[in-house]
């Protein structure tokens, strides 16, 4: 009888344990719909709309650094402008591949404003649905709430930027709104 009990316990455990990790028990959380419009919203409580940006492999590790700005580069060259010091902008990083993921601690975006202010958003959704040798783009819904729970940063819409490189392999900047 002792062997029969162990077999019964093992059988129950083999059926019950996989259910603990199944998707059926996970809370999927809210779904964030991305509006079919140019990326826009508020950063630090101020109106913001995507106009220009760039993507580059800044560190040579295959991860793209993507900056989304509310203005055009001053010299008109999508791959030739320098990052803006205090202009509100958004930073996204990731591989140049199609994704549709919720934002999280591991997959976040940064709202940047002022001289060195950064709000890290883990609430929202990032879609990358355009990836070519020269362009990357998609949609973004992201929001950030301050310590009182007030939403201070929130953007929603589509974006597309140029992937820039140079002969040195260090990359240059560039891109424009859709």
Image (cartoon, grey):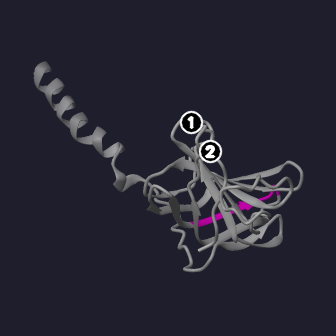
Mark number displayed over residue 171: 2
Crowd rating for badge 2 (residues with CA inside 10 Å; few <14, some 14–19, many 20+):
some
The N terminus: image quadrant: top left
Total marks shown come to 2
Percent of width and height locating residue 138: 52, 66
Mark number displayed over residue 60: 1
N-terminal label among 2 and 1 = 1
Task: Give the side of residue 30 with respect to residue 145, left or right.
Answer: left
Percent of width and height locating residue 119: 76, 53
Which sits in the foreground, 117 or 123?
117
Q: Residue at x 62, y 76 (%)?
A: 38
Q: Residue at x 53, y 35 (%)?
A: 61
Q: Residue at x 12, y 20 (%)?
A: 3
Quarter holding residue 8: top left
- SS under mark 2: loop
Q: CA distance from mark 2 to mark 1?
A: 9 Å
Q: Specify whether residue 134 is painted magenta.
A: no
Percent of width and height locating residue 47: 80, 74
Q: Residue at x 43, y 57 (%)?
A: 98
- SS under mark 1: loop
Judged by its main secondary structure, the magenta piece is: strand
Q: Is residue 123 above or below residue 2?
A: below
Instruction: Kindly give the residue lying farthest to the top in the view shown.
Output: 2
Which sits in the foreground, 174 or 88?
174
Percent of width and height locating residue 20: 35, 43
Q: Is residue 61 above or below residue 51?
A: above
Which segment is the magenta one? Answer: 140-147
Mark number displayed over residue 138: none
Instruction: Kindly give the residue lying farthest to the front in the view shown.
Output: 167
């Amino acid at each position: 009888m002792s062997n029969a009990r162990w077999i019964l316990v093992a059988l129950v455990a083999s059926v019950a344990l996989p259910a603990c990790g199944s998707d059926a028990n996970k809370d999927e959380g809210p779904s964030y719909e991305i509006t079919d419009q140019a990326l826009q919203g508020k950063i630090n409580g101020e109106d913001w709309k995507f106009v220009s940006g760039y993507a580059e492999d800044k560190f040579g590790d295959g991860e793209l650094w993507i900056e989304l700005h509310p203005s055009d580069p001053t010299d008109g060259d999508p791959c030739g402008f320098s990052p803006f010091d205090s202009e509100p902008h958004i930073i996204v990083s990731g591989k140049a591949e199609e994704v549709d993921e919720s934002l999280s601690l591991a997959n976040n975006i940064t709202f940047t404003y002022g001289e060195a202010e950064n709000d890290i958003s883990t609430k929202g959704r990032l879609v990358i649905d355009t990836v070519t040798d020269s362009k990357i783009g998609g949609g973004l819904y992201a929001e950030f709430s301050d310590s009182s729970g007030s939403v201070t940063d929130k953007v929603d819409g589509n974006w597309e930027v140029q992937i820039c490189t140079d002969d040195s392999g260090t990359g240059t900047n560039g891109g424009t709104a859709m």
